[in-house]
Image (cartoon, grey):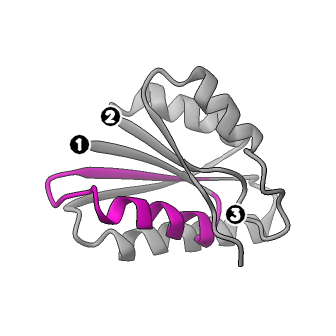
Amino acid sequence: MHYLVGTDSVHTTAAICDYLDDRATPDDTVTVISVTHSDDRTARRDGEEALNVASVRLASVSRVETDTRSGTAADALLEAVRNVDADEVIIGAHSGDPDATRDLGSTARRLLEEADRPVVVVPIPEL
């Protein structure tokens, strides 16, 4: 199985890794993409930390690939969906920002509408 993960924070990555704990096997591949705005140093740092968490938490998976992209999250993830032969896309329900609304975010809505493979939306626990 090949999972494509979209994240923007440690909290989102942790929730996605909780989801993958019972699913991902050593034979699987997980591609984790952090999307940030290139001019936002804090967002870039948060994205890098999110990728580090994924590498550590998914240590039992033999192939964990990480990548940082800039731009709009929905555009970057839809491009990755087209370029990565993933079986499933996993994202958070909304931004990992503690101040974000608890509603389904615009990136999640757009991926659910436009992705041509299953999209799993995991809830982000409140802090």
- Neighbor class of circle 3 (other Cα within 10 Å; few <14, some 14-19, many 20+) is many
Residue 90 part of the magenta-drawn span? no
Image x and y of residue 12, in percent: 59, 63
Query: What mark, if any, has residue 1 been given in the picture?
Result: 1
Image x and y of residue 9, in percent: 64, 66
For the record, the magenta segment spans: 8-34
- Give the Cα distance between marks 3 and 2: 24 Å
Q: Quadrant of residue 60?
A: bottom left
Image x and y of residue 93, in percent: 65, 50
What residue is rendered at 54% in x and 29% in y? 79
Question: In which quadrant of the rendered image does the C terminus lie?
Answer: bottom right
Q: Which comes before the other along the chain, label 3 or label 2? A: 2
Q: Which comes before the other along the chain, label 3 or label 1? A: 1
Image x and y of residue 61, in percent: 23, 63
Query: What mark, if any, has residue 100 been given in the picture?
Result: none
What residue is rendered at 33% in x and 52% in y? 30
- Tag 1, which secondary structure? loop
Type of amino acid at the residue the image marks with label 2: Asp
- Tag 3, which secondary structure? loop
The residue to which callout 3 is attached is 96
Is residue 40 found left or right of 81 in the rendered image? right
Outermost residue, left side: 27
- Give the Cα distance between marks 1 and 2: 6 Å
The residue to which callout 2 is attached is 87
